[in-house]
Amino acid sequence: MKSFTHLGAYVLMLKGMFTKPENHKMYWKEFMHQCAEIGIGALPIVVIISLFLGAVSTLQTAYQLVSPLVPITTVAQIVRDSMILELSPTVLSIVLAGVIGSKIASELGNMRISEQIDALEIMGINPKSYLVLPKILAGIVVIPGLIVISAFLGILGGRLAGDFTGILASDLYDIGLRQNLNMFNLLFALYKAYTFAFIICSISAYYGFHVKGGALEIGRASTSAVVASCVLILLADYTLAALLL
């Protein structure tokens, strides 16, 4: 029964976001601020994780492909498809759920217990529209871009690792990247990116917006937001794969 209560409150929050803006410039400024906060704030961890994911994928794939019957360029194909289909969209989204999701939940939770949200309502401003909607829209715009950057850096990291360790020369790696490329994989990765971005931002905003209590509840809300986002990301990952692949 508690799950249905959360679901109903979540749907009502999403429904309450879509009202006419009181001041378009104010909303646009908040949207751009959230884009900068989400994108620039998460970029360093995206770069580090992506490079190492690609490098480790190259080393482990080469370790398992010990048969002389398998061309060495297959390593590049596996790294490319792994980064595009799963590692960059799913693994990175789980990391971003911790980085971005906890930030959104704690920010809104702090505004709730400090009564800033109540003050906005008294001023005639819809807090769901002003606080939640720009965060969700900014996440939908920025997070897919981070995932695209992650896929590129992961493939680059695999190329550098193969070259430095002598497993796979750069020219052979580039040949493997161009072989058997399925363009639908790129489209599928974007489907996942937009879905996961919406899940991360909306779930985190819901838990933060509905905090009750004090500072301890803010920490609990942030933890609950990250856990719920990760579970829903994995569920959505399986659902999209079952429907589209």
Image (spheres, rainbow, N blue to C red):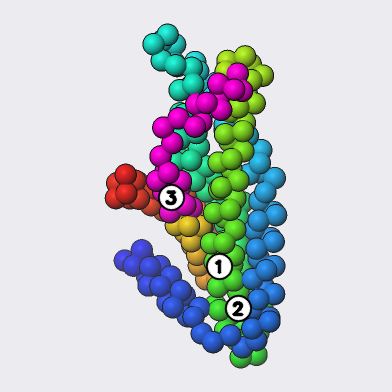
Residue at the farthest left position: 243
Q: Nearer the viewer, mark 1 or mark 2?
A: 1
- Looking at the rendered structure, the kind of residue marked 2 is Tyr
Instruction: Tell me if 107 is positioned left or right of 94 in this view.
Output: right
Q: State whether residue 166 is above or below residue 234.
A: above
Give SS at disc 2. helix
**Residue 3 coordinates in the image, percent (x, y):** 36, 63
For the residues bearing labels 1 and 2, Cβ distance under 8 angstroms: no
**Residue 115 coordinates in the image, percent (x, y):** 65, 78
Quarter-of-image position of residue 130: bottom right
Please name the residue shown 69% across and 75% down the image: 29
Tell me the crowding category of disc 1: few under 14, some 14 to 19, or many 20 or more residues within 10 angstroms, Cα based: some
Residue that mark 1 sits on: 137
Residue that mark 2 sits on: 130
Nearest the eye: 96 or 63 = 63
- What main secondary structure does the magenta stretch of the protein show? helix
Give SS at disc 1. helix
Q: Nearer the viewer, mark 3 or mark 2?
A: 3
Residue 125 part of the magenta-drawn span:
no
